[in-house]
Image (cartoon, grey):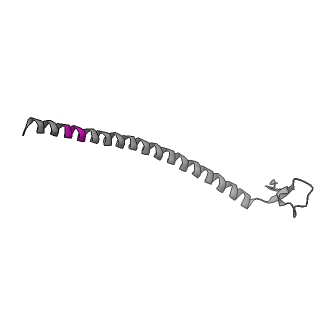
Amino acid sequence: MSTQAIVDRLAQKKQELAALQRVKALSETTDAHCMELDRQMDKMVRQYETMLSIALGWSSAFENATLIDIRRSGDDDAEHPESVIRIPAEEA
């Protein structure tokens, strides 16, 4: 094998090594991004679970409560249903 062929072969191997190093760095960066994305998704799932449990608690409270209407204005609630607030009545 000639000296030039050896030099060419070494240059090719250096290029291959540089490409592999770029792929490795990209893979490490991608892994870090995936880990951060996974952490953020876990956080969002926990927040939604908390919101759902609160909503279910309120839903159960209203299903089991005796409700009363409080009129916010002197308007007829048939014409203006938004003028009525429905709240749980106090338990005696």
**Magenta stretch mostly in which secondary structure?**
helix
- What x and y, as percent, mark residue 14? 22, 37
Q: Is residue 13 magenta?
A: yes
Q: Which quadrant would residue 77 be assigned to in this image?
A: bottom right
Q: Quadrant of the N terminus?
A: top left
Instruction: Name the residue furthest bottom.
Output: 78
Count every numbered label the image shows and give the total.
Answer: 0
Q: Which quadrant would residue 61 be assigned to in this image?
A: bottom right
Residue shown at the point (16%, 38%) measured from the top left: 8
- What x and y, as percent, mark residue 54? 65, 52
Which is more toward the observer, 1 or 19?
1
Q: Identify the magenta region.
A: 11-16
Which is more toward the observer, 3 or 79?
3
**In the displayed structure image, the side of residue 54 where residue 69 appears, left or right:** right
Which is more toward the observer, 45 or 88?
45
Which is more toward the observer, 2 or 34?
2
> As displayed, is residue 69 above or below residue 37?
below
- What x and y, as percent, mark residue 83? 85, 56
Instruction: Name the residue furthest left.
Output: 1
Q: Is residue 25 magenta?
A: no
**In the displayed structure image, the side of residue 79 where residue 37 appears, left or right:** left
Q: Quadrant of the C terminus?
A: bottom right
Instruction: Name the residue furthest right.
Output: 74
